[in-house]
Amino acid sequence: MKKCALILAGGEGKRMQSDGPKTLCEVLGKPMLKWVIDAVRGAGIEDICIVKGFRAECIDEYVSTLPFAVHTVLQSERLGTGHAVMMAREYLEERGGSVVILGGDAPFIDSDTIKESFAQHTETLSGATVISAEVPCADGYGRIVRNTDSSLAAIVEHKDADEETRKINEINSGAYWFDTNTLLSVLDRITSDNKAKEYYLPDALKLIIADGKKAGAYVAKSSDVALGANDPAQLLELNEIAIKKGYKPEA
């Protein structure tokens, strides 16, 4: 079955005190983006596209040093994760099959999680599958709400969640599998009708479910798959976690 990967890497590193893209900040001496690329390739996916944005030339320069081909597309305005995927429409249309969409600043996503979530995605004939994680404190994260058959009912953002929903400790990691044609069927219906005026990728799952198609959630074995960094303190924490838990960049 045809598979490809879309890695979102348009964010700037301003809060990281870096003048380059956030995803090129390093964990254990390797850019976070490369951790994600290697996890994807370790899962047997070689068709990879990076959505670049801030200081796109830095991504281009880095990709040129890799010993394998990686596609890139430009998100000239950073208008949310959904908008980033819209910039890759042509790439997705040419591929078909299934696509895994990952954040380039989440270095602890691993090959096994990518492979096992894909297995569930295909076995359940889902149009979309979110990779979730169970955490002791879910504050700030989107909650995974399931139907009685364990399929995905909704992803409810923390700010929109009622008291009962906030008790849920299963969260959205920000990584997803989609049937590519199903994703394309809803992509242009994602709106920016929110305070930030941005297009959010989780809205694609909402539309897929509203269209009567099945969506699911795969619980990662480690909640670390949801970890990212937005400032130097969080980047330091990622490095400390990597050392403490013996993480090694996949090759």
Image (cartoon, helix red, strand yellow):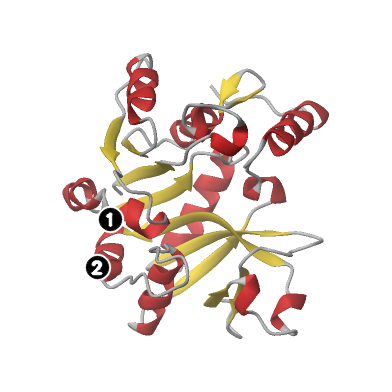
**Residue at x-position 58% and y-position 83%:** 147
Q: Nearer the viewer, residue 32 or 152?
A: 32
> Residue 91, how many percent across, how many down?
21, 45
Dividing the picture into quadrants, the one containing residue 79 is bottom left
**Element carrying mark 2:** loop
Would residue 40 be visible to someone looking at this image?
A: yes
Above or below, 89 against 49 in this view is below
Amino acid beneath label 1:
Met
Q: Which mark is residue 139?
A: none
Q: Nearer the viewer, residue 146 or 169?
A: 169
**Element carrying mark 1:** helix
**Residue at x-position 74% and y-position 36%:** 233
**Residue at x-position 25% and y-position 63%:** 184
Amino acid beneath label 2:
Asp
Please report contact status of discs 1 and 2: CB closer than 8 Å, yes or no. yes
Q: Nearer the viewer, residue 196 or 126?
A: 196
Would residue 222 be visible to someone looking at this image?
A: no
Q: CA distance from mark 1 to mark 2?
A: 8 Å
Mark 2: few/some/many CA within 10 Å (<14, 14-19, 20+): few
Mark 1 = which residue?
86
> Residue 37, how many percent across, how many down?
46, 32
**Residue at x-position 61% and y-position 33%:** 16
Left or right, 148 with reference to 51: right
Mark 1: few/some/many CA within 10 Å (<14, 14-19, 20+): many
Left or right, 68 with reference to 162: left
> Residue 35, how many percent across, how many down?
54, 30
Dividing the picture into quadrants, the one containing residue 106 is top right
> Residue 74, how many percent across, how many down?
28, 40
Left or right, 201 with reference to 94: right
Mark 2 = which residue?
188
